Image: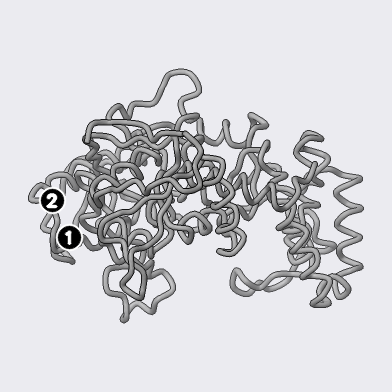
Amino acid sequence: MSESTASAAPSAARTAVRLTPAQARRIALAAQGFTATPRLRRRRPFDPALERLHVLQIDSVNVFARSHYLPVFSRHGGYDPSALDRQLWTSGEFTEYWAHEAAFIPVADRGLFAWRMAEYRERHSRSGREDALATELARVRATLTAEGPRFVRELEPAPRGGRGPWWDWSDTKRAVEMLFASGEVVAAGREGFQRRYALAEQVLPAAALEPVPRAEAERRLVERAARSLGVGTVADIADYHRLKVGPARRAVHELAEAGVLLPAHVAGWTNRAGRPEEAWLHRDARIPARLAPDALLTPFDPLVWFRPRAERMFDFHYRIEIYTPKEQRRYGYYCLPLMVGGALAGRIDLKADRGSGALLVQAAWSEERAPARTAETAVGLLARAAAWQGLDEVRVSGAGNLRLPARFDAA
């Protein structure tokens, strides 16, 4: 099928668009911003990727690179991460919230999550946590009102003594995170991975503080997720912004009535009962005649973050093993999915050894049906990844079944 765009004529009873698995994959890759011309633009270079993704998941793991930097690298190659930081933090166009997990979202869309903020407030009240922290909540609010944005360490009433592991939160940290979840407090920048907190009205425009009614918000989030996925099941679409399947299904049907989503049948997509899986195609989805990108992906890339979709779409069973005891890991601590020619062909456990200037390949694995050029492609991607991170060379341990040179230079 040559490249085309789905028809937009509204019809509740429209015949399902029939797609092959390969067509569905190309639709998904195009919707996610993997294009035949991956170079960044000179002016506002990150806009295309950020618009396609809508949410950019944040994660604390930093053995190779912070997760939110990787989707842009996967789609466009090397760039200056500080330039992305400036757009995310100083443009006034983005903010953080629990949109998938913790994620950057457009400030203009913050009101779409007001119902989730209200749910957090109700949950905290119902559980008694709000009453238990009432004094600390009031103190944090008063401090932020009087002094402006502050890190948690600056909000603590006194220096903390011995610290336990990272989940050993003080009452101040608990109070701040409660206020963040309920929308009263926002992140006003970061230092390392620590948020600098501020009252929402101190740093956001008035329009971003206006709530969108829940039904409308869910419908808009479903439309946005479907646009970013290209084609997907209701479960795929619901997971993108962590919606419940019931409300997501209602929104899908409303959007289908309006002609925004088109029913689709993807050959081989079946449910647990073995029946064809209901799927939906966004009316603006492109169906490329050919699209076969190569990329290293973060485990938190929207292309793979919903594991059932990754398995259905790419026949790729993936689980992150960070929290698996070392002796029980199959592939490695922090394996990045390896895409070759638009197929998920392997996984590579990476670590940046900045002291020695080397990118360490702690294990490299190929899938059973990996293309013949998988090793060659991996070498090129790893060389570029090392250069992007300012490292001089790549060192390979030899663990895993993907055979790579023991050492090679960054590209």
**In the image, which disc is placed on residue 276?**
none
Residue 375, numbered label:
2
Does 290 appear above or below 160?
A: above
Classify 10 Å Cα crowding around label 2: few (below 14), some (14-19), many (20 and above). Answer: many
Residue topped by disc 1: 366
Q: Callout 1, which amino acid?
A: Ser
Which quadrant does the C terminus fall into? top left
Q: Residue furthest top?
A: 43
Residue 236 spot, x, y in % from top left: 45, 57
Residue 150 vertical placement versus 134 (above, below): above
Q: Give x and y (percent) for residue 47.
A: 50, 29
The structure residue drawn at horizontal position 83% and vertical position 43%, both measured from the top left corner, is 148
* Residue 196 in the image, given as x and y percentages of width and height: 70, 48
Q: Name the foreground residue: 86 vs 274.
A: 274
Tell me if I can see residue 63 in this picture: no
Q: CA distance from mark 2 to mark 1?
A: 8 Å
Q: Earlier in the sequence, mark 2 or mark 1?
A: 1
| Front residue of this view, candidates 227 and 203 | 227
Lateral position of residue 255 relative to residue 308, left or right: right
Residue positioned 55% across, 52% down in the render: 253
Q: On screen, 102 above or below 37?
A: below
Q: Residue furthest front?
A: 13
- Quadrant of residue 271 in the image? bottom left
Where residue 298 appears, x then y in whole percent? 38, 52
Q: Nearer the viewer, residue 270 or 328?
A: 270
Image marks 2 and 1: residues in contact by CB distance under 8 Å: yes
Secondary structure at numbered mark 1: strand
